[in-house]
Image (spheres, rainbow, N blue to C red):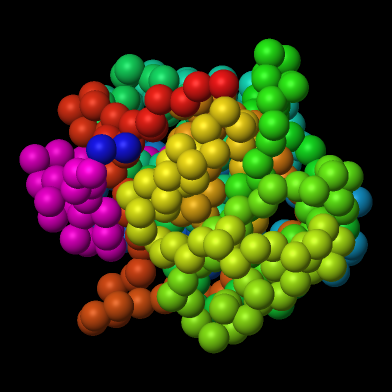
């Protein structure tokens, strides 16, 4: 990516810089978390929504009854808030549905927009928002594109349980012609590595880069280090120069940092592992879509209904909603460096 300024920031600031676009078509995801309606509420209250579509991604039916009941209760409350305010419905899908369902439904949504699109990924599961970002990268109907991410006040200690085996995300598998390439693992440090260490331990002397979100709150800093120690317990020590400190919110910096790692390791295929902040996952999704790189993840069988709590605020009670401009007037603002194998 060329060294140029790409605007990003809180939603009120970014919207003020795009005043010529009065209204947007919005896609979001309702969940048990309060922040699932954070961006939608702000945009609706400020008259910025032309049309909107909400998804509800349902967890596995065999989740423990306590989780299922709480999720249903909290989701029901969010749905009431949403429907009372706008009177529109939502689409429900199963968590493990095919990636083509996400892509096809998203394309139908895009067809009905005027080309100015906002997608909120705050609570959209990775196996759903990665295929959506892939469609965004290639879609010529979308002229102006913003991705939003609402920051919660706190996170639960345990966010998901009973992880499935590590797998490539749907539509982000390895290309047959690159199977013999040497691999590097680019991992965003989060709170729970789930079954990631078990999978990496199958490789002999794996080469890993850890993107460590910094600065961070003390608890986040501590849990990110716990994440790294868990990987090291199964896979060996990670060299200090491969623990890369990067902002958890500054998308241009994150994207540029990952590009630099790939350039340093030219000829090796990166496998992205998104376990940390959603903006890091967004950078992975864009690069994987642009360069056809694989992405792997250990999907929890079910999520804690209190995965996060509340919505962080700044200034005079303005919700903290990070907003990223990806396209302007049909032009992609994020472009990867040339890669050769």
Lateral position of residue 169 relative to residue 85, left or right: right
Residue 280 seen in render: yes
Residue 316 pos. (x, y %): 23, 81
Q: Is residue 224 magenta?
A: no
Decide which of 165, 340 is in the foreground and name it: 340
* Residue, far left: 20
| Position above or below: 282 against 65 | above
| Position above or below: 285 against 293 | below
* The magenta segment: 3-31
Q: Is residue 10 magenta?
A: yes
Q: Quadrant of residue 77 in the image?
A: bottom right
Residue 259 pos. (x, y %): 43, 41
Decide which of 125, 211 is in the foreground and name it: 211
Instruction: Name the quadrant of the C terminus.
Output: top right
| Tally of numbered tags | 0
Decide which of 184, 77 is in the foreground and name it: 184
* Residue, far top: 177
Residue at x 46% of width, y 53% of height: 279
Q: Quadrant of residue 57 in the image?
A: top right
Residue 270 pos. (x, y %): 61, 37
Instruction: Name the quadrant of the N terminus.
Output: top left
Residue 21 pos. (x, y %): 15, 39
Q: Quadrant of residue 92 in the image?
A: top right
| Position above or below: 141 against 219 | above
Residue at x 21% of width, y 54% of height: 14
* Residue, far bottom: 218
Lateral position of residue 58 relative to residue 108, left or right: right
Lateral position of residue 167 relative to residue 106, left or right: right
Residue at x 70% of width, y 40% of height: 296
Decide which of 36, 231 is in the foreground and name it: 231
Residue at x 69% of width, y 31% of height: 182
């Amino acid at each position: 990516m060329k060294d140029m300024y790409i605007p990003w920031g809180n939603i009120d600031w970014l919207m003020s810089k795009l005043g010529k676009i009065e209204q947007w078509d919005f896609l979001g995801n309702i969940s048990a978390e309060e922040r699932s309606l954070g961006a939608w509420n702000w945009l609706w209250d400020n008259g910025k929504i032309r049309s909107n579509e909400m998804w509800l991604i349902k967890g596995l039916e065999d989740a423990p009854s306590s989780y299922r009941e709480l999720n249903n209760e909290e989701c029901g409350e969010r749905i009431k808030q949403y429907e009372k305010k706008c009177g529109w419905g939502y689409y429900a899908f199963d968590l493990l549905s095919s990636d083509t369902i996400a892509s096809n439904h998203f394309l139908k949504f895009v067809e009905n927009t005027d080309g100015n699109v906002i997608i909120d990924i705050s609570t959209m599961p990775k196996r759903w928002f990665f295929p959506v970002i892939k469609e965004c990268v290639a879609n010529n109907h979308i002229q102006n594109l913003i991705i939003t991410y609402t920051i919660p006040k706190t996170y639960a200690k345990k966010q998901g349980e009973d992880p499935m085996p590590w797998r490539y995300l749907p539509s982000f598998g390895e290309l047959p012609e690159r199977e013999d390439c040497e691999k590097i693992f680019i991992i965003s440090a989060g709170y729970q590595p789930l079954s990631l260490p078990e999978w990496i331990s199958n490789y002999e002397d794996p080469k890993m880069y850890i993107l460590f979100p910094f600065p961070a709150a003390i608890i986040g800093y501590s849990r990110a280090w716990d994440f790294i120690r868990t990987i090291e317990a199964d896979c060996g020590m990670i060299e200090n120069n491969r623990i890369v400190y990067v902002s958890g919110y500054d998308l241009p910096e994150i994207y540029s940092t990952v590009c630099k790692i790939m350039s340093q390791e030219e000829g090796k295929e990166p496998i992205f592992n998104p376990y940390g902040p959603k903006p890091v996952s967004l950078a992975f999704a864009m690069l994987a879509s642009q360069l056809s790189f694989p992405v792997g993840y250990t999907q929890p069988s079910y999520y804690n209904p209190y995965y996060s709590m509340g919505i962080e605020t700044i200034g005079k009670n303005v919700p903290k909603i990070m907003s990223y401009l990806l396209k302007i007037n049909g032009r992609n603002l994020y472009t990867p460096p040339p890669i050769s194998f």
